[in-house]
Image (cartoon, grey):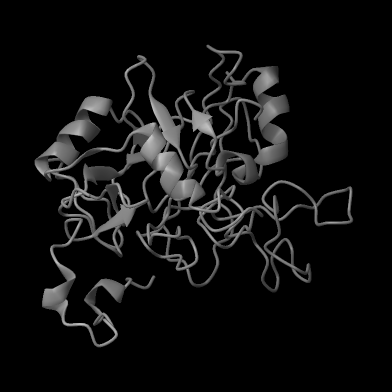
């Protein structure tokens, strides 16, 4: 049964609450999204006051109306890897050995990070796949993510690719960039730069926020438009997207999707699972997408990314 506290916490940030099971009904779909009709339930977890209750279980698939991650207070395939590189007249043989394996970016001149979130070998643009043998790095596929990801699984998948799970320091350095920005793309939250809960707010003609400008706006999922203190708010058809789908969601070294899409598990030894970067279903994407936000409360869309030491030591 959904407790009263669950209703009070969840009601402002979900489209509707129906009956004691706290079901989310399907919302009207944008014409350009061919998503299956499905409803996701909200689990009224209250085993930790820090979690604030109403943590969503289980994770919905890419075609479902996904669950919402609440804070403790709470497609076009990228073809750039195939494009020729302009070396400015320099012969490629004069550049020396590459400091990183393919599909990895050299960060701060010291370590390599996968350009994209980890994906399974059989992932496609519409499915995360099922093979869990090795982590791959490629654009245009649904990333490896689900609730219940273990550190051993992520470490093993990276090791099978000749890499390792990124450390918290490496992840945060890549996200902040040389300018120490709040997000990988800058210091001001933008609901459309990376994939978050505000990205697909119902802004078009005949939808909840028809005529609202600008739209999407920050917190359009669950707050009224700027200058207004009363509903309606927009709601949104939030969902995971293929890797590299947002060209502006990139850091200074060319690493994509560090903010949003799926949470990224990092390698720690304190007995806790630390997830970074936020995801597509964070109730407060402005806060949870920050480079310095560290989630140890068990978010739902759990993914990871691989790192490696530079192949060229200075």
With respect to residue 97, does 287 lie above or below?
above
Q: Residue at x 16, y 82 (%)?
A: 91
Asked if residue 307 can be seen in this view, the reply is: yes
Q: Residue at x 67, y 50 (%)?
A: 221
x and y percentages locating residue 205 in the rendered image? 69, 74
Instruction: Say which of 52 and 63 sits in front.
Output: 52
With respect to residue 104, does 282 lie above or below?
above
With respect to residue 206, does 61 lie above or below?
above
In the drawing, does residue 289 fall left or right of residue 250?
right
Q: Residue at x 18, y 40 (%)?
A: 158
Q: Residue at x 76, y 47 (%)?
A: 223
x and y percentages locating residue 137 in the rendered image? 23, 55
Based on the displayed image, in which of its 4 quarters is residue 94 positioned?
A: bottom left
Instruction: Say which of 150 and 56 sits in front.
Output: 150
x and y percentages locating residue 169 in the rendered image? 40, 35
x and y percentages locating residue 55 in the rendered image? 53, 27
Which residue sits furthest front? 314
Q: Quadrant of the N terminus?
A: top right
Based on the displayed image, in which of its 4 quarters is residue 226 positioned?
A: bottom right
In the drawing, does residue 281 fall left or right of residue 116?
right
Which residue sits furthest bottom? 89
Asked if residue 65 can be seen in this view, the reply is: no
Instruction: Say which of 163 and 131 sits in front.
Output: 163
Instruction: Say which of 100 and 10 sits in front.
Output: 100
Based on the displayed image, in which of its 4 quarters is residue 237 positioned?
A: bottom right
Question: Number of callouts in the render?
Answer: 0
């Amino acid at each position: 049964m959904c407790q009263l506290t669950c209703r009070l916490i969840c009601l402002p940030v979900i489209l509707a609450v129906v009956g004691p099971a706290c079901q989310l009904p399907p919302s009207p779909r944008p014409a350009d999204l061919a998503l299956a009709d499905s409803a996701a339930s909200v689990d009224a977890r209250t085993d930790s006051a820090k979690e604030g209750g109403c943590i969503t279980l289980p994770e919905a698939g890419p075609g479902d109306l996904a669950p919402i991650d609440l804070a403790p207070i709470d497609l076009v395939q990228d073809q750039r890897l195939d494009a020729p590189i302009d070396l400015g007249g320099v012969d490629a043989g004069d550049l020396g050995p590459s400091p990183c394996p393919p599909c990895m970016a050299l960060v701060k001149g010291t370590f390599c990070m996968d350009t994209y979130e980890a994906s399974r070998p059989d992932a496609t643009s519409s499915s995360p796949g099922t093979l869990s043998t090795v982590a791959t790095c490629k654009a245009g596929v649904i990333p490896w993510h689900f609730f219940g990801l273990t550190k051993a699984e992520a470490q093993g998948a990276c090791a099978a690719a000749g890499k390792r799970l990124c450390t918290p320091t490496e992840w945060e350095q890549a996200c902040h960039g040389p300018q120490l920005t709040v997000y990988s793309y800058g210091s001001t939250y933008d609901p459309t730069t990376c994939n978050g809960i505000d990205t697909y707010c119902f802004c078009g003609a005949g939808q909840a926020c028809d005529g609202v400008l600008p739209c999407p706006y920050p917190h359009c999922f669950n707050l009224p438009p700027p200058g207004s203190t009363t509903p309606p708010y927009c709601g949104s058809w939030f969902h995971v997207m293929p890797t590299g789908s947002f060209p502006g969601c990139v850091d200074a070294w060319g690493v994509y999707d560090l903010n949003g899409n799926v949470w990224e598990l990092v390698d720690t030894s304190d007995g806790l699972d630390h997830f970074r970067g936020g995801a597509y279903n964070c109730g407060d994407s402005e806060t949870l997408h920050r480079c310095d936000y560290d989630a140890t409360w068990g978010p739902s869309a759990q993914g990871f990314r691989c790192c490696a030491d530079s192949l060229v030591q200075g």
